[in-house]
Amino acid sequence: MSDVDYVYAVARIRSKELGLFSAAVIEQLLSRPDYEACVSFLAEKGWGGADTPRDGEAILMREREKTWEDIRDLTPDMSVFELLNYTNVFHNLKAAVKEVCTGAKVDHIYYSDTDPSAEEILEAVQEKDFDSLPEYMAGAAKEAFETLLHTKDGQLCDVIVDRAALDAVCRAGQSSKTPVLRDYAEATVSAADIRIAARCCRTGKPEGFILRALAPCATLSAEELAHAAAAGEQELRAYLKSTAYGGAADALDVSLSEFERWCDNQVIEAMKPQKYNPFSVGPLVAYALARENEIKTVRIILSGKRTGMPEASIRERVREMYV
């Protein structure tokens, strides 16, 4: 697309950004007394559709579909957005491997609207036709399947798939000609690496296990991060303080929930400059990520309300909004 084409597309996206939930709207949702009241609030805001059941997960799924319908309507070059789908595609791979190896089927576990689709991934795993999957996931699919089948180690299966997902994001970002996608990839992989290191540190994983789970990226040393995490929380915090991610150490001092929120907020912060860029695909990418973040935040609130979690505990998990 030309710059002129993007000017039109960005103008359309700017109008849609007006419908994004602000921090004030999230506060209104948080103030609702229970799950059913939250679902009613979402319906009042136009979430879901005429045929969508009054169920939180169904509403969120429909909102995600709306986002990608809008994006497809605005640009014919959907290859630009392939990178944003990797997280959900690899989630579907993980779910398919576990379903085939264990025989346990879980409702609503798969993301829809991915390429390859959840059905295509599940069929490939069932038929052990891993070569039919995209090159960036074929090897991990085979390794994860064989690992889970022979060792029954679900955690190791997760590590294999999650590492492959991060490697795919990193490679795609580094090869992209779109600056916002490079920024997104680096923010995503670095935040994920820090999250993995912190979790492994708290569960006492050895350095070799941690290093296997971490994906190399430009702004962190996987080797130093793994070594610090294996040495303990004090060493992990000290290492993070020596990098551009000192805020992660501060968040860890508060709570694990605050740290998880910090990780997700890094991606949104990386996207915010796109609000002022009218001449590229950047604002469309940022809008898609803002919607994913918005849906994730609403899911956190709905889950908390459904389980009776105290409002203060839900609040500390709420992510920063794009608007």
Image (tube, rainbow, N blue to C red):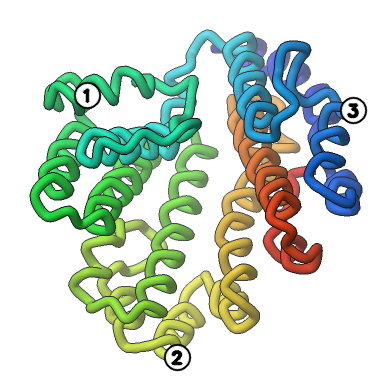
Q: Position of residue 114 (x, y in %)?
A: 43, 23
> In the image, which is nearer the foreground, mark 3 or mark 2?
3
Q: How many marks?
A: 3
Residue 239's place in the image compared with 142, above or below, is below
Residue 177 visible: no
Q: Which mark is residue 234?
A: 2
In this image, 168 relative to 190: left or right?
A: left
Residue 49 image position (x, y, % from top left): 75, 16
* Residue 237 located left or right of residue 92: right
- Tag 2 or tag 1, which sits nearer the N-term? 1
- Sequence-first disc among 3 and 2: 3
Look at the numbered disc 3 and give the secondary structure of its residue: helix
Q: Amino acid at mark 3?
A: Glu
> Which label was assigned to residue 133?
1
* Mark 3 → mark 2, Cα distance in angstroms: 47 Å
Estimate how packed mark 1 is, as few (under 14), some (14 to 19) or many (20 or more) residues with alpha carbons within 10 Å. some
Q: Residue 78, image x and y in percent? A: 48, 17
Local secondary structure at mark 2: helix
For marks 3 and 1 on the same chain, the one whose residue lies earlier in the sequence:
3
Q: Residues within 10 Å of mark 3 (few under 14, many from 20)?
A: few
Residue assigned mark 3:
44
Look at 54% across and 12% down and name the residue there: 1
Q: Residue 260, how many percent across, how many down? A: 57, 64
Q: CA distance from mark 1 to mark 2?
A: 42 Å
User: Given the image, on which type of amino acid does mark 2 rest?
Assistant: Gln
Q: Picture quarter containing residue 54?
A: top right
